[in-house]
Image (cartoon, grey):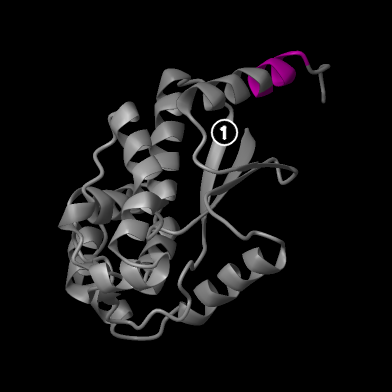
Amino acid sequence: MIKLDIISDVGCPWCYLGKAFLDRALEARPDHPFTVEWHPYLLNPEMPAEGMDRRAYMEAKFGGKEGVERANAPLLAHARAAGVPLNLDRIARTPSTLDAHRLIHWAGLEGRQNAAVSALFRALWRDGRDIGDGETLTEIGAEIGLDRALVTRLLASDADAGTIRARADHARARGVTGVPTFILAERHVVQGAQPTETWIGIIDDVSGQIGGAEPGR
């Protein structure tokens, strides 16, 4: 198996699209050689725990309503073309994603990391749920089979918050300045939300190289 490390922030819509494109490729090639592991990145490390009003945040970031529309146009176009549900109008708040990353970490300890990532992306970008809210995160944890009471206790503590921040800082120190960033076999870097066709080509190339390796290699 080939390790595919994905550095991502569930608060990043391009990461959401990138996962959707990759998932389709993996489904198209069920015998793919990848084992996937998700790693945290904080696009807004100073975001307050309660998040911010979405409209105010976006207009401040992109210079008003017209700037927001220009920034969203390519994102929405890619989502429409790919048939990926992206409902920006449902999002009332831009969340802090620190606790969402903690949930992903805990889910990973129980073999449910990918389920957690998928559920969090859908919750925010499809359904407009506030993934910075503790009750919402507890519900999402329960939806993927985590113990509700345990998740509630962990979220009420600072458990693993320092670890998540340190891992995100480590990614920045390694030169990751944008997400999603995909790392194949700890050597080859693929950046951005690559279309499904690109991933199918990568899977076929890697599978071909593995199939052509000498015995014992």
Farthest residue in the bottom direction?
A: 157
Question: Which residue is denoted by mark 1 in the rendering?
Answer: 34
- In the drawing, does residue 110 fall left or right of residue 130? right
- In the drawing, does residue 7 fall left or right of residue 146? right
Residue 112 seen in the figure: no
Magenta stretch, main secondary structure, is: helix
Residue drawn at (27%, 81%) of the image:
50
Q: Nearer the viewer, residue 159 or 9?
A: 9
Amino acid at circle 1: Phe
Residue drawn at (30%, 55%) of the image:
120
Quadrant in the picture for residue 178: bottom right
Instruction: Please tell me whether residue 192 belongs to the stretch shown in magenta.
Output: no
Instruction: Please tell me whether residue 210 belongs to the stretch shown in magenta.
Output: yes
Residue 115 seen in the figure: yes
Q: In the rendered view of the protein, which quadrant contains the C terminus?
A: top right
Q: Nearer the viewer, residue 207 or 178?
A: 178
User: Percent position (x, y) of residue 49?
Assistant: 33, 82
User: Percent position (x, y) of residue 211?
Assistant: 70, 15
User: Percent position (x, y) of residue 22?
Assistant: 46, 33
| 176 shown above or below 166 | above
Residue drawn at (48%, 19%) of the image:
29
Residue drawn at (37%, 60%) of the image:
11
Which range of residues does the magenta coloring cover?
206-212
Label 1: how many residues lie within 10 Å, few (<14), some (14-19) or many (20+)?
some
Secondary structure beneath dot 1 equals: strand
- In the drawing, does residue 13 fall left or right of residue 137? right
User: Percent position (x, y) of residue 100?
Assistant: 35, 66
| 80 shown above or below 38 | above
Q: In the rendered view of the protein, which quadrant contains the N terminus?
A: top right
| 15 shown above or below 46 | above
Quadrant in the picture for residue 65: bottom left
